[in-house]
Amino acid sequence: MLTVYSEKHRLRDAKTELHGGTFVRPFECPERAEIVLARVRQEGLGEVIAPRDFGLAPVLKVHDPDFVRFLENCWEDWVAAGGEGEALPNVWPTRAMNGKRIPRSIDGKLGYYALAGETSISDGTWEAARAGADVVLTAAEHLLSGQGQSAFALSRPPGHHAAADQYGGYCFLNNAAIAAQFARDKGVERLAVLDVDFHHGNGTQNIFYRRDDVFFASLHGDPMDAFPHFLGHADELGEDAGEGFNLNFPLPPGTDYSRWRDALDEALARIVAFKPGLLVVSLGVDTFEQDPISFFKLKSDDFADYGARIGTAMKAVSVPALFVMEGGYAVSEIGINTVNVLIGFEG
Ligand code: SP5
Ligand code: ZN
């Protein structure tokens, strides 16, 4: 399996995350990608290539231009406004306010465009996020040219929490959605996104919620208990043309592999019935039992088993799979768990 990787992910190296009422070094740190890359090489998964530059056009097919400009200029604007630490929001257009007008000040803009408050914006964040989009686009292009049944986009920072005009949950650009939209524009008529990250892929769901050409399925910690808290319930089925094309499996604290696997099998059956031309897998390995911020109980061997289940289901119907790196914060095991999925898929 081809892996696409860019060293530019290292530019996303924030110093602060708001966690438990204190600032900690972010869980989403550069070592994550380095450890996954080392494991890809150690296991001989296949060739590793750098991305090509796609420019912003495919990003703007998914994200709002004002939001993209905000991300591009945020750090500079924050510093110019006297920010000493990293850029963080501290006020939001919540239910009791009117969120329609975009403020002029950087403090107002941060609140307008942030969907969560843990994620600092720092110098280099935009460059890393942009390179991450090029990583998934390069992997998607490779699959679309008919080379192979699978590819791995080792992108960082992750993407699935980012909506068309919102960042947060460590995510800035929605890499999985950008790849899916790119594939649509290159002639793939129907696509499925399977999100196996511990957290609900609220950004991806929101981007495709009214569409019947992209089927979204997600297995995740019940939002009643887990981030992002405000999306990911079982009764969110899609709207308008998209009704029936969104599928959530919110799962309770302590969920072990047998329960998780039953949900996966159900999701895979629905995906196969949808007859997609391509599967995008939002691959977060924060379902691991030792993940520091999550509450599922998967073991390292379980990742290989579920990779094989995805592989068996997709190969039976000749659907290629694009794996896109999302979360996973048990850093010392992130390489083993991630590459176990990919090796399991290959069979
Ligand atoms: C891509 C991805 O996995 N993003 C995750 C973002 C999670 N952000 C906030 C998590 C808050 C977790 N609080 C857990 C407390 C555990 N004791
Ligand atoms: Zn996650």
Image: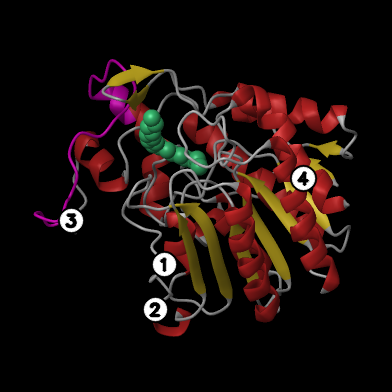
**Residue farthest along the bottom direction in this orientation:** 241
Q: Residues within 10 Å of mark 3 (few under 14, many from 20)?
A: few
Relative to 290, say whether 134 is above or below.
below
Q: Inspect the image, locate mark 2, and give the three-letter code of the amino acid beneath it.
A: Glu
Disc on the earlier residue, 1 or 4: 1
Q: Is residue 135 left or right of residue 18?
A: right
Which residue position holds label 1?
234
> In the rendered image, which quarter is residue 105 located in?
top left
Say which of marks 2 and 4 sits in front: 4
Answer yes or no: do the residues labelled 3 and 4 have beta carbons within 8 Å?
A: no
Say which of marks 2 and 3 sits in front: 2
| Label 3 beta carbon less than 8 Å to ligand 1 | no
Q: Inspect the image, locate mark 3, and give the three-letter code of the amino acid beneath it.
A: Gly
Q: Residues within 10 Å of mark 1 (few under 14, many from 20)?
A: some
Q: Residue 339: percent from the left, percent from the top?
A: 76, 38
Which residue position holds label 4?
304
Say which of marks 3 and 4 sits in front: 4
Q: CA distance from mark 3 to mark 4?
A: 44 Å
Report the span colored magenta. Answer: 77-98
